Amino acid sequence: MHAISGNNTNSTRSDCQVRITIDNLKGQKVILKSKVEKLYGNSIIKLCNEVTAFYEIDNYQIEIEDTGALPFVLAARLETAIKKLKPSDKNFLLSDPIKANVHISLNSLHRSRLYLPGNDPKLMINAGIYGADAIILDLEDSVSPEKKNEARILVRNALRQIDFYGAEKMVRINQMPLGADDLKANVPCNVDTILIPKVEKPDDVLLVEKEIEKWIVPGDKKKFLMPIIESALGIENAFEIASSSKNIVALAIGLEDYTADIGAQRSAEGKESFYARSRIVNAAAAAGIQAIDSVYSEFQDLEELRKVAEESKALGFVGMGCIHPAQIKVVNDVFSANESEIEKAKTIVLAFYDAQKNGKSVVAVGSKMVDPPVVKRALNVIENAIICNNLTKDWREQNG
């Protein structure tokens, strides 16, 4: 009896393929094929012994084809293969996880979120260096059905072992009930935000939230939610979804599935999705959360991406998804407050504060009247600028 896990090493790097046999064997044997065998062979064999001992397997033969897999990848692949032969609720966890010292709140920036396939470790390892506000480890559309469990275990290990350099750590789960297994594996392991795909009604959010509560480690930080609306029904229920939980940090839209649902072709102009995107922005604003636009799939056309992002910002979105690291800088630039916006916001806020000191609730700035809603928008610009380091905290402290 044998089982295989991992990706074919002829076309991948930073990964491995593991084959374990446990039938009619006596003793332990590890057959390793790796360019780094001389340097790390003993460490790899030691790790294999630790994982098999954890799952109480005494007799085995393990064959490993390695293309530079890190220990968390090797452990994930071996655990997956073992569980195919010997199902277990226990999870093998490497010691010394990365400390989760990044503070995430409802007001955290979500200008750019980089999607990474959940079963491809080579894309995860250095993902944090590109400067995305969030990293999304995807267990849904980018993972084939037969690889879901492999990806689930790999993502769990990646959350514990990879330094994403301050990026918010997100996991996009599968639709329930399959998503329940994703939550069980990943909620206890340094994830910040759960992306819920194909949400059509508030109950879809509440079901996930209830499942999350089962697996939160006592004393762990709050887990935020980001529903993704991808259908006509979801758009019509957008506000009810956006306001269904106090843990929702943002409302996102997925345009590939949405346009398919309404029977339209997605276009560069976006006329077919204008209504839906406007509903998302309005629903998010009414619920007091952020609105996140869909990805732009032509990742090599950065000039067109900038136009799309600028139009998105003009609609009221605060960020969008990215499918390639090259998109991150453009998206961050567009959704960050520019110098002109910052100066205008500072002028409005200071003028309003002066008016308040004199007992007034509105004031003229130039030829326009400024009232509390306008000030609120200006304050949002200033907070954005402070978070993006385009304005120092000193300005806010000095000016109240």
Image (tube, rainbow, N blue to C red):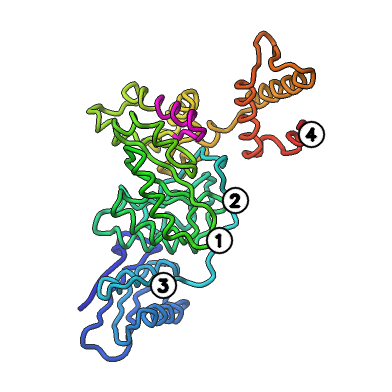
The structure residue drawn at horizontal position 39% and vertical position 77%, both measured from the top left corner, is 51
Count of all numbered marks drawn on residues in the image: 4
- The CA span between labels 1 and 2 is 15 Å
Q: Which is in the foreground here, disc 1 or disc 3?
A: 1
Q: Amino acid at mark 1?
A: Gly
Nearer to us in this view, 98 or 56: 56
Q: Which residues are magenta?
A: 278-292
Which class describes the residues within 10 Å of circle 1: few (<14), some (14-19), or many (20+)? few
From the image, tell me which residue sits under label 1: 219
Question: Where is residue 252 shown, x and y percent of the image?
Answer: 41, 37
The residue identified by callout 4 is 398
Query: Could you tell which of marks 4 and 2 lies nearer the N-terminus?
Result: 2
The residue lying at 44 percent from left, 58 percent from top is 187
Image quarter of residue 148: bottom left
| Mark closer to the chain start, 3 or 4 | 3
Q: Nearer the viewer, residue 260 or 242?
A: 242
- Please tell me which of labels 1 and 3 falls first in the chain: 3
Magenta span contains residue 243: no
